[in-house]
Image: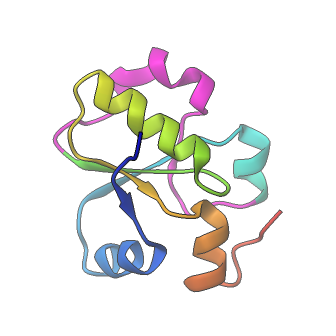
Amino acid sequence: MSVPEIRAEELKRRLDAGENLYLLDVRNEDEYETSNIGGHLIPLPELAGRLSELDSSREIVALCKMGPRGAKAVQLLNKVGFTKVRNLTGGIHAWSDRVDHSVKKY
């Protein structure tokens, strides 16, 4: 099942334009501590139990290391009724490669 995605360059452009996006980082805490772009950390295994922390009125961009966990998060959120959710294509690695080389890849 394919999920809606956003490329790193488009996300950067939209953030720079001041759009009110909610960055949902679904990696583990140790990964987040190693490298992050300021998203809200809710590890994927905890997401179903923490849905009340999300604002369904905002567009949510899920991200992980390289994309697969973010895609699973999008699928989960779509299943429970969130409609404005996208996955960051290529995850934090794509952000590091295409937007900000100072973001550490691991």
Determine if the magenta segment contains residue 54: yes
- Which residue lies at the image location 47% right of the left edge and 15% below the top edge? 49
Q: Which residues are magenta?
A: 35-57
Q: Quadrant of the C terminus?
A: bottom right
Q: Position of residue 75 (x, y in %)?
A: 40, 34
Q: Position of residue 64 (x, y in %)?
A: 61, 50
Q: Position of residue 78 (x, y in %)?
A: 30, 32
- Which residue lies at the image location 24% right of the left edge and 33% below the top edge? 82
- Which residue lies at the image location 22% right of the left edge and 46% below the top edge? 84
Please state if 9 lies on the left or on the right of 18 as rendered: right
Please state if 57 lies on the left or on the right of 79 as rendered: left
Q: Is residue 34 above or below residue 9?
A: above
Q: Is residue 91 above or below residue 14?
A: above
- Which residue lies at the image location 43% right of the left edge and 81% below the top edge? 9
Frontmost residue, 95 versus 1: 1
Q: Is residue 35 above or below residue 10?
A: above
Frontmost residue, 96 versus 6: 6
Please state if 43 lies on the left or on the right of 63 as rendered: right
Count the labels in the image: 0
Please state if 27 lies on the left or on the right of 19 as rendered: right
Determine if the magenta segment contains residue 2: no
Q: Position of residue 4 (x, y in %)?
A: 33, 53
